[in-house]
C-alpha cells in the first residue's frame, strides 16, 4: 500500500530542506575554510616579516648566528610551522623544523619551491595550499616573502604549516555553526509538519465527505476553514453536493411524474378494454371509449419520444444540421400547426416580426421543435381568452425570438431550475397541465448545441416570456453542416 499524502509531502519538504541546507552548508564551509586559511597565511606572512628583521640584525652582527637560529626554532615550535631561509641561488641558508615534519635537501628542486623563488625574486609575496610537495607527507599551506637586506633581495623566507595542524580550529568553528544549523532544521521540520497537516487534514475531510456522498448521505457538507485553494476546493465540493442533492430530488420527482403520467393512461386503457371484453360497455359507446384509448396511447407515445430525444441529446447522439432559413416563415408554420390548440383556449395571437425576412444559420428541424415546445407551453399555461404574443427583433449579428403567454407566471424561486431536466413547476400532477418537465430541458439543450442562449422573464400573475437567440446568416458560417 502506498504511503499517504501526508508522509509523502513531509518527506519531500524535509528532503528539500536537507538538500538546501547541505548546499548552503557546503558553500558556507568552503568559504569559512578559505577565510580561515587566508587568515592563517596572513599571520604567517607577518611572522615571516618579523624573521626578515631578525635576519637583518644577524647580517649586521647585532644578533649572533646561534641566537638567530634559536629564535627561529623557537618561533617555528610555537607556531607549529616549518621555516626555510633560502638564498637567491636556491641554496639553504637556514631551516627551522622542530618536529622534523619536512624532508628536504640543501638544494630545493620541488616545483612549488621554484615558483616561490621566482615570485619573491620579483619582490612579490606568494601563498598556496598544496598536497603535491614531496617535502611533506600531507597537505600544507605555504607563504613566501622576499628576504631583503637594506632593500636588496638576497633570497626568500618560506613558512610552511601542515593543514592537519589547523583542521581542529576549523572543526571547532564548524561545530559552533552546525549547532544552530541543526536547530534551524529541527524548527523547519516542525513548521513543515504543521503545514503538511494543515494541507492534508482538509483533504482528508473532503475525502471522507466524498465517501459519505457515495454511501447516499447527500446532506453531508465540508466546512471551509481557509480562503486558499483548499478552501475553494471545499466550497466547490459543497456546491457539487448541493447539485447532487438537487439532481437526486429532480430524479425522484421525475420518477413520480413519469410513473403518474404512465400509470393514469395505462389504467384508463386497461379499464376501458376490460370493460369492452366484459361487455360492461354498451356497443354504441365503444367508439367513444376507443377514441379515449387512442388519445391516451398517443400521450404515452409523446412522453416516450420526449424521453428518447432527451437521452440522445445528453449522450451526444443528436447531431444538428446547419442550414440557412427564414425564422419568420418557420414561426408562421409552427403557429398554423398549433392553430387548433390556440383556438381551443380562445387565445388572441399577436405577432410582430421585425423584418419581412430574417435569414438565420441553424438546424431548421431542431429550431422548429424549440418553437413548437415554447408555443405549446405558452398555450398550456395561458388563461382562456388570454393573449399569445410572438415577436422577433435583431441586434448586431443576432436575431431574438420572443414567445410570451398571459398565464400565472413562474415563481421567482422556481425560475433558476425551470430548464433542469425532469423539473416541473406544477407539482400537483394536474391533468389540466400535462407534462413531465422534459420539453423545456430539450429546448435548452438544442439551443446550447447551437451555441446560442435562452432565458426567461416571468412575474406571478403577469405571464412568462421566453427569449432565445440565433445567428444571422450574413454573419454565420459558410459550411452547411455541423454536428455537435
Image (cartoon, rainbow, N blue to C red):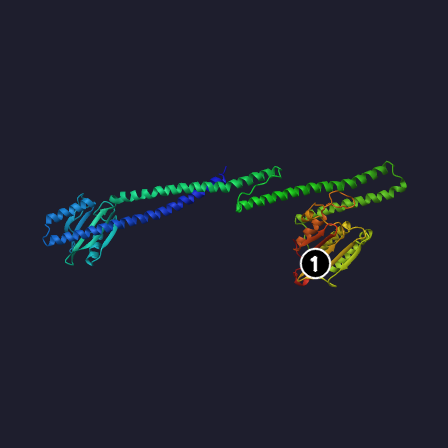
Q: Count every numbered label the image shows and give the total.
A: 1
Dividing the picture into quadrants, the one containing residue 145 is bottom left
Dividing the picture into quadrants, the one containing residue 237 is top right
Query: Residue lying furthest top in this view?
Result: 278
Is residue 108 in sight in this rendering? no
Residue 457 or 422: which is nearer the viewer? 457
At x 51%, y 40%, the residue is 201
SS of the residue at dot 1? Answer: strand
Crowd around label 1: few <14 · some 14–19 · many ≥20 (10 Å): some
105 vs 253, left or right, is left
At x 40%, y 40%, the residue is 186
Residue 213 x/y as whole percent: 60, 39
At x 14%, y 47%, the residue is 71
Residue 319 x/y as whole percent: 67, 52
- Which residue is label 1 attached to? 400
332 vs 477, left or right, is right
245 vs 21, left or right, is right
Residue 463 x/y as whole percent: 74, 52
At x 57%, y 39%, the residue is 209
Residue 122 or 435: which is nearer the viewer? 435
Residue 358 or 115: which is nearer the viewer? 358
Residue 409 x/y as whole percent: 73, 50
Is residue 168 in sight in this rendering? yes
Q: Is residue 295 above or below residue 371?
A: above
Amino acid at each position: 500500500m502506498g504511503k499517504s499524502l501526508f508522509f509523502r509531502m513531509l518527506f519531500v519538504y524535509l528532503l528539500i530542506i536537507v538538500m538546501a541546507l547541505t548546499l548552503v552548508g557546503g558553500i558556507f564551509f568552503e568559504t569559512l575554510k578559505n577565510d580561515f586559511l587566508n587568515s592563517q597565511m596572513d599571520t604567517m606572512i607577518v611572522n615571516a616579516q618579523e624573521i626578515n628583521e631578525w635576519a637583518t640584525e644577524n647580517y649586521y652582527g647585532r644578533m649572533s648566528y646561534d641566537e638567530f637560529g634559536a629564535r627561529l626554532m623557537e618561533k617555528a615550535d610555537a607556531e607549529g610551522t616549518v621555516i626555510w631561509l633560502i638564498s637567491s641561488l636556491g641554496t639553504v641558508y637556514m631551516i627551522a623544523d622542530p618536529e622534523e615534519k619536512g624532508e628536504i635537501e640543501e638544494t630545493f628542486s620541488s616545483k612549488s619551491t621554484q615558483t616561490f623563488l621566482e615570485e619573491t625574486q620579483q619582490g612579490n609575496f606568494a601563498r598556496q595550499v598544496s598536497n603535491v610537495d614531496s617535502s611533506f607527507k600531507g597537505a600544507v599551506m605555504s607563504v613566501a616573502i622576499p628576504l631583503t637586506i637594506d632593500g636588496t633581495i638576497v633570497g626568500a623566507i618560506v613558512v610552511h604549516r601542515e593543514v592537519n595542524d589547523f583542521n581542529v580550529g576549523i572543526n571547532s568553528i564548524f561545530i559552533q555553526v552546525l549547532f544552530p544549523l541543526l536547530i534551524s532544521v529541527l524548527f523547519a521540520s516542525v513548521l513543515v509538519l504543521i503545514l503538511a497537516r494543515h494541507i492534508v487534514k482538509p483533504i482528508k475531510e473532503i475525502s471522507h465527505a466524498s465517501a459519505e456522498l457515495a454511501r447516499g448521505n447527500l446532506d453531508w457538507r465540508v466546512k471551509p476553514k481557509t480562503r486558499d485553494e483548499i478552501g475553494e476546493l471545499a466550497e466547490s465540493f459543497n456546491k457539487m453536493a448541493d447539485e447532487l442533492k438537487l439532481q437526486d430530488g429532480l430524479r425522484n420527482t421525475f420518477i413520480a411524474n413519469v410513473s403518474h403520467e404512465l400509470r393514469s393512461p395505462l389504467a384508463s386503457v386497461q379499464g376501458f378494454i376490460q370493460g369492452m371484453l366484459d361487455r360492461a360497455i354498451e356497443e354504441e359507446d365503444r367508439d367513444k371509449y376507443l377514441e379515449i384509448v387512442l388519445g391516451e396511447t398517443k400521450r404515452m407515445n409523446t412522453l416516450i419520444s420526449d424521453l428518447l430525444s432527451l437521452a440522445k441529446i445528453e449522450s451526444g447522439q443528436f447531431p444538428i444540421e446547419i442550414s440557412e432559413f427564414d425564422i419568420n416563415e418557420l414561426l408562421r408554420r409552427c403557429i398554423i400547426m398549433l392553430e387548433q390548440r390556440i383556438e381551443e383556449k380562445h387565445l388572441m395571437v399577436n405577432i410582430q416580426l421585425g423584418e419581412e425576412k430574417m435569414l438565420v444559420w441553424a438546424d431548421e428541424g431542431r429550431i422548429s421543435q424549440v418553437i413548437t415546445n415554447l408555443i405549446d407551453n405558452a398555450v398550456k399555461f395561458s388563461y382562456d381568452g388570454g393573449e399569445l404574443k410572438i415577436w422577433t427583433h435583431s441586434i448586431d449579428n443576432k436575431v431574438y425570438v420572443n414567445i410570451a403567454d398571459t398565464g400565472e407566471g413562474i415563481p421567482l424561486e422556481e425560475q433558476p431550475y425551470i430548464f433542469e431536466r425532469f423539473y416541473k413547476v406544477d407539482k400537483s400532477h394536474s391533468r389540466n397541465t400535462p407534462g413531465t418537465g422534459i420539453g423545456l430541458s430539450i429546448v435548452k439543450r438544442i439551443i446550447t448545441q447551437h451555441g446560442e442562449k435562452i432565458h426567461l422573464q416571468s412575474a406571478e400573475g403577469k405571464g412568462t416570456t421566453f427569449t432565445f437567440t440565433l445567428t444571422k446568416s450574413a454573419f454565420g458560417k459558410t459550411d452547411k453542416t455541423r454536428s455537435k
